Amino acid sequence: MSDNKDRLGDKLSKREKAEEDRYFAEQEAAKLAKLKAEAEREAAVGRCPRDGAALDTQDHHGISTEVCPTCRGVWLDKGELEAIEKRDDEHWPTTWFRSILGD
């Protein structure tokens, strides 16, 4: 009888160990996926979404835009399109004064 009890105890401890190993493997996989996503985001900053080339920053009338030197795509950050639209609604005298004053 004690032999059966020992086998049952061994099976239970093996199962507990297997579930513990599975739990920690899932935790590690989740952490690795999070780190990989963060690394991809950091690598993508300053890169063209189309071809991965490094973007050049250009200033157009006080609004900075990123331009891809290979595909010539223009990329805007948050708020830059609204600033361009605001400038586009200005009348020509305002635009002329801005160009003279360097703003």
Image (cartoon, rainbow, N blue to C red):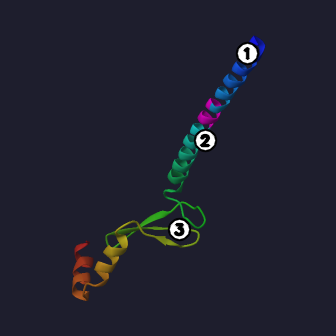
Location of the C terminus by quadrant is bottom left
Q: Secondary structure at mark 2?
A: helix
Q: Which residues are magenta?
A: 20-25
Q: Residue furthest bottom?
A: 92
Secondary structure predominantly adopted by residues drawn in magenta: helix
Badge 1 amino acid: Asp
Look at mark 3 in the image and give the residue it sits on.
68
Look at mark 1 in the image and give the residue it sits on.
6
Location of the N terminus by quadrant is top right
Relative to 45, is 78 above or below? below
Q: Quadrant of residue 63?
A: bottom left
Q: Earlier in the sequence, mark 2 or mark 3?
A: 2
Asked if the residues shown at circle 1 and circle 2 are in contact, with their CB atoms under 8 angstroms apart, the answer is no
Q: Earlier in the sequence, mark 1 or mark 3?
A: 1
Q: Label 3 neighbourhood size at 10 Å, few (<14), some (14-19), many (20+)? A: many
Of 22 and 58, nearer the camera is 22
Q: Residue at x 48, y 63 (%)?
A: 56
Look at mark 2 in the image and give the residue it sits on.
29
In this rendering, position of residue 1 left or right of residue 79:
right
Of 25 and 34, nearer the camera is 25
Distance between the Cα atoms at labels 1 and 2?
34 Å
Coordinates of residue 60 in the picture (x, y in percent): 37, 73
Relative to 97, is 43 above or below? above
